[in-house]
Image (cartoon, rainbow, N blue to C red):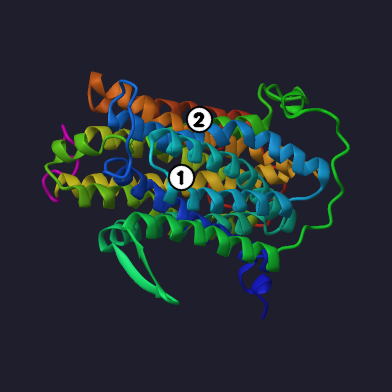
Amino acid sequence: MSVRDALGVNPQVLALALARMSESVGNSFLVVVLPLFIASEFVTGGTFGLTEVFITGVVLSIFGFVNSPLQPFTGRLSDRTGKRKVFVLFGLTLIAVAGVGYVFASTYWHLIGLRVLQGVAGAFIIPTTVALVNDLATDENRGGNMGTYNTFRLVGFGVGPIAAGGVVAAGPFSFSLGAETVRLTGFDAAFYFAASTAVLAFLLVLTLIRDPDIEPSESDESFLESLAVRDPTGEQLLDPVFALGVVSFFMAVGIAVFATLGDIVNTELNQGADMFGLQFAAFVLAQIFLQAPIGRATDFYGRKAFILVGTVLLVPTTLAQGLVPDYSLAFGLISDSWVMFSARFLQGVAGAMVFAPALALAGDLASEGESGSTLSVLTMAFGFGVAAGPLLSGFLVAWGFVVPFALAASLAAVGVVIVATQVSEVNSPKRAIPLVGYVT
């Protein structure tokens, strides 16, 4: 029995998922390594009157702020050329070059420049890989393929931070290269490893992936000209793809508000940094377990019901995180730290019900040869949400710990209304789902 028959997953999608998993390991490595590198004696130069903590935030967040607005344009360009693979290979090359570049970086400007380069690389990789998944899938298995792809990507994102700190701490390393003895600091080893994961991903894509047989888009419109906010059919207020993008942005904000509050969460819950790391990973853990089966289920039961239920679940699971320090939500049965972990995990369940099904539904809506442009609306929105969430929480937490979570929960509630009224099924579900009463 083939992989396609057993799992409903195209073998090339599986190969692409493995490549993204490899690249994600290296990219997530940097999320842990760069703050440590900035705080070390290896980085010098003036801070321009800014705090080191602020510069660290800029270095980490600039990746999202660079790649997100560029994604629709690279996605559109891949539609016009009818090629995806060359965009992915180019992006992975930039990732590898930047990874090696960190070894020679010594100032804050070097780090910012390399992160900008990686952001450009992400703009070439993210929309085109998602478009490739969509092109390789069919209406009957698009959800399963999207779920599997996202699962592997998230496994890589989750594994990287676990190993990164250990590599840095284990340095320096020495080994013989002919008559020469090569010495690497822990940081050098981490950066070379991050680059090597991009090289491995490059080789996987180069040897295992081929461009699907699609006709290049004949549209001369730019992305901005083609982006529809209002529903062109007049049946609804918002274009359904735009509506799914708005919901993806709201979801990403709700996920990301937790990221910058580590010190405050640890103080409020009287816990260590290791527990915060576990709470942060709880969302990813739920995604890893559930994205593939939920995506597969949407192929049979339809997409909208899962997106709607997931968006509804985002409201209480996001708000609960802001209430944990002041209200014992488990009535003393378990510690507040584990209540926070549970809230994050359930938020991950909600996210698994939204993102992969939303991508699959957008894929259903995409015209022939327009996958890059269409799906980039969602990937761009998600990227902006991940970048905006930490900035919002850092600003709003001054008015109370619950405030950023309450805002994110309110946005999710608006998302419920949007999904219920502005999003419709495209393909008829193969099986009836035991959920009645939701708006079609």
| Residue extent of the magenta highlight | 325-334
Magenta segment: does it hold 265?
A: no
Residue drawn at x 59%, y 59% is: 296
Q: Position of residue 76 (x, y in %)?
A: 74, 37
Question: Which sits in the foreground, 236 or 205?
Answer: 205
Magenta stretch, overall SS: loop
Q: Nearer the viewer, residue 408 or 293?
A: 408
Q: For the residue labelled by badge 2, is the local secondary structure a helix, a strand or a loop? A: helix
Q: Quadrant of residue 409?
A: top left
Q: Which amino acid does the dot numbered 1 rest on?
A: Gly
Can the viewer see residue 97? yes
The residue under label 2 is: 415
Q: Quadrant of the C terminus?
A: top right
Q: CA distance from mark 1 to mark 2?
A: 13 Å
Residue under label 1, please give it.
Answer: 351
Camera-side mark, 1 or 2:
1
Disc 1, disc 2: CB below 8 Å? no
- For the N terminus, the image quarter is bottom right
- In the image, residue 13 above or below residue 114: below
Q: Residue at left 27%, top 52%?
A: 278
Give left or right: position of 15 versus 41.
right
The quarter of the picture where residue 418 lies is top right
Q: Is residue 269 above or below residue 140?
A: above
Task: Classify 57 as above or below 293.
Answer: above
Category of crowding for the residue at label 1, using alpha-carbon neighbours closer than 10 angstroms: few (below 14), some (14–19), many (at least 20): many
Disc on the earlier residue, 1 or 2: 1
Circle 2: residue type: Gly
Q: Is residue 111 left or right of 95 when viewed as pictured?
A: left
Q: Residue 343 at what x, y percent from top left?
A: 30, 44
